Every structure is written in C-alpha cells, then in structure tokens.
Amino acid sequence: MEVRLEDKDIQILDTGARAKPGDRPFDYVQEFNPTSDNDVVEVLIHDENQNFIESGEVDTEDITISKDGVTIKTGVVLRKMGYDRGKYVVKYNFLRNLAGSNKTLLVEENGTPFVPLTITDVNGLQVPNYHIMPDGTIMDGPNHEASENKILRLLEFKYFIQEISSTRREIRILPQEIKDKKYISDFLSLPSGQKRVQINNIAKFKSDSLGQPSADQSLQIELDNGLNVFPQMKGGLIYFNNAFIESEIREVPIRDLDTRTEELDSENVQSRFLIIGDNGRQFKGDKSLQKIHDFFSPLELEAGNLRDEGTNNLSYESDNRSLKDIRWLNENIFQKVNYTAEGGGTESPVILTLRSISERPQNVSFLYEWEIFGFDKQGNRYNKITTKIPGTEGGEIFIPSQPNSLSTSGTDLKELTIHIYGEGVRVGVRLKISSKDGLVSEVFYPSCIEVND
C-alpha cells in the first residue's frame, strides 16, 4: 500500500498498540468522521501507468469506518464517476478542511447566502427556489412569475489565489464576496492559527436549581457535554452575542474602609488583614476589623485568662479560654462584620476576599499562612466548622485555592478568597507571616465574621 505521510504524521494515526485515554501525545486530534462537513475522502483516479485522470469526493454512503478498519465501495465510486469498465489505479486521501470546501452556494448580489434553496409547491413537493433564465442568469423564485427580481450568483466555497511568489513557496489568497461567518472566520484563522468556533445554545453561565446565577459560580461558564474542548482552546475567549448587564454588584470603595488597604513597608513586623471585597451581601460592621485587631493582636493563642471588655462581650466554647474557643463577640464593642445569608446559605455562599495589610520589610520575601476556624450554631449546639465541597451536603468553608482544607500558605500570598456556606456561622481567621531570617508575626481574629439569616 502506498503511504505518503511523513513519520511525524504517522504518529498521529492508530498504531495498533494499547494505551490509556490521555496517554497519547496527539489525543486532541478528533477522529475522522466522513459525515462531518469538515472531513472528506478524496478519490484520485489514474490509468494503469499511474497517469492522473481526475479526482472527486466519495459519498458518505460509500464508506464505512469501524473498529475493524475502513471499507470503501471502490466499484460504486468508479461507476458514479462514469467508469464502467477498464483497469484503474485508485488512491484515496483522507482530508480535513481547515478553510473552504468543494461545495458551491448561491449568493445574492451583496454576497449574502441565498435562502431558502428549496420551497414547498402547491402539491407539497420540494422544488428549487431559483430558476435559470435563457441567457444563463440565475434568479430567485421557482419561476419568473414568482421572482422578486433578485439576481443570484453561483460561487464556490473556496478562496482564490491572487499571487504566487517567485520562489513558489508563498501564495497570497483572497476570499470571495461571501458574507458567511464561518467562511470569513476560517480565512482569518489560516495565517494566525487562531480559530473562532460558533457555539449554538450549549454555553451558559452556571446557575442553581431555580435558574438563578450561583454566587460562587457567577462568572463560570458551563459547556454542553457534547462539545469537544481540546488543549488549543485553553486561553481563548468566549463571546456572548447580544449580552447585556442586568445588575452590578458594587465593591466597597477604598475610602469607605477608613484604613489603609495595602501593606506598609516597615522595619517592624506586624501581621494584619481586612476584608477587601465580597459578593455584595448586606452586612453590618467594620470590614477593616480595626477594633478586633486592636484588642486581639497583643494576645497569644493559648492565653489562659482572656480579659473581657465589659460584661458578656466574649462568649467561649465550654470553659476553654483560648482564642480559637471564642464563639461570639459583642457587635457594639468589636464591630465585627455580620453578613445576611440568602436561601439558607446552602447553595448561595458569602464570598469574601481577605487581604494582608501587614507591616513588614517589602524587600524581604515572606511566607503567609492562613487558617480558618470557628463554629456553626445549630439550635443550642456549637459545632466546629468544617470544609465544604460545593454541591454536596455538610461543611461551611470552601477555599478555592486549597479545597478540602481550612488552611493554606504560600510565598507572598497576600490575598485569600473564602466561601462561607450556611447560616449561624461564626468564622475566625489566623494570619501568620514569617521570613527565612526569623521575622515572625501572627494574629488571631476570633469570630470576626458572622453569617446569619
């Protein structure tokens, strides 16, 4: 059998070896499908001396592709092309169109594809919606009496060569006057390798069971399971035609925080953070957490006897007195941030972004260690909060950058996003910063954030 593929191309084809899905280096190449508009089987007919005679395309009903191989009805193909007898050398090319095709189409004078090509007559039969005049002019309508006097042109769905370089290694091609999105998009993708794919009704923003956008997934796009997404699409853009903004969630202006919002370059080291952004829920309190910081920053985690600011301003878990055991702070004294839950909070979490505004030498690299702790009040019981897997029951805290964990760390990890599910949730945060030179500072803000109905 004649093979005209280079070695690097043969690697893409089936080698006959066994392999797990994803192991092959060219897994992104979709399988050949002769029923697709982009995949065609070209037939080349030669005489016995290998002299080329003509070429054509194999009809889809004359080729079968299965796990057992490829079967082509060569006799049927030859007879359809007018070869009833004789000996011929027949070769096949399996091609995938990157741009254009061998198809033809009717267009109006301005280049717009003419539709519909067929209509139903009075007898219920499908007839052409165009006719040819004696001088060869193609016009709309099944006959001249039904015509709207539109003159049509028959064009090939191809691009024409305008110029060939003197070295015959470069060509300049131009499109025809065809106003078709795919035709133009394919043409533009030829030199850049970037291609635009039109998706019809199979891409949408994720939503909950009621069809409302989920707060934690409001900007995530869900693609239909039937859509093939391959590596070249990663990093691309998705455009929603005729989209509009229904509502806008206003972020709190920096001036409203009444404190600095960036870290301070200092020889001293003092960890501190604030709430820099959320997903627009109603709240009461101070996002700068200024009074909480002033009270708790001098304290250590295992302090034996925490002092109260007045009477019943702190509430503990049992008789413990460590910072992690504080389950309630007085709003009037500490001005903690109290968010309002929506729908019970199980499907629509409060999403917060915490930012470090610590004092530290900015020319030194620091490790940031974040930890979330706290309680979920269920009736008269206080359960320690646990991790949440979105879409499943149970758990209160989901950290997108570190799923299945209540803590995360990283070099210069100055911001952290957390999702808080449920209601009656009291959340505390620990931030520790440290350098290789031994510069260390940490703060515990217990029960600094609440989510209630």
Image: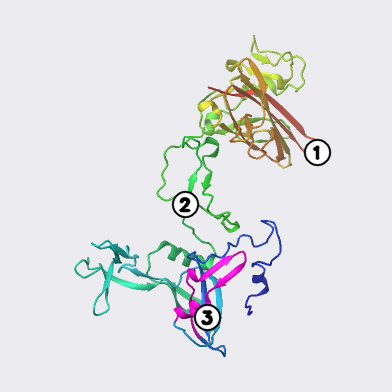
Marks 2 and 3: CB-CB under 8 Å? Answer: no
Marks 1 and 3: CB-CB under 8 Å? Answer: no
Q: In the rendered view of the protein, which quadrant contains the N terminus? A: bottom right
> Left or right of 225: which side holds 240?
left
Mark closest to the chain's N terminus, 2 or 3: 3
Marks 1 and 2: CB-CB under 8 Å? Answer: no
Q: Is residue 341 visible?
A: no
Q: Distance between the residues labelled 1 and 3?
A: 74 Å
Residue that label 2 marks: 239
Residue that label 1 marks: 437
Question: Residue at point 35% right, 65% down?
Answer: 113
Q: Is mark 2 on a helix, strand or loop?
A: loop
Seen from the viewer's position, the closer of residues 131 and 262 is: 131
Residue that label 3 marks: 44
Question: Residue at point 49% right, 77% down?
Answer: 77
Q: Distance between the residues labelled 2 and 3?
A: 41 Å
- Residue stretch rendered in magenta on the structure: 53-81
x, y percent for residue 432: 73, 32
Q: Is mark 1 on a helix, strand or loop?
A: loop
Q: Can residue 119 be seen in this view?
A: yes
Residue 253 belongs to the span the image colors magenta: no
x, y percent for residue 6: 65, 75
x, y percent for residue 213: 49, 37
Q: Is mark 3 on a helix, strand or loop?
A: strand
Q: Is residue 172 above or below residue 425?
A: below
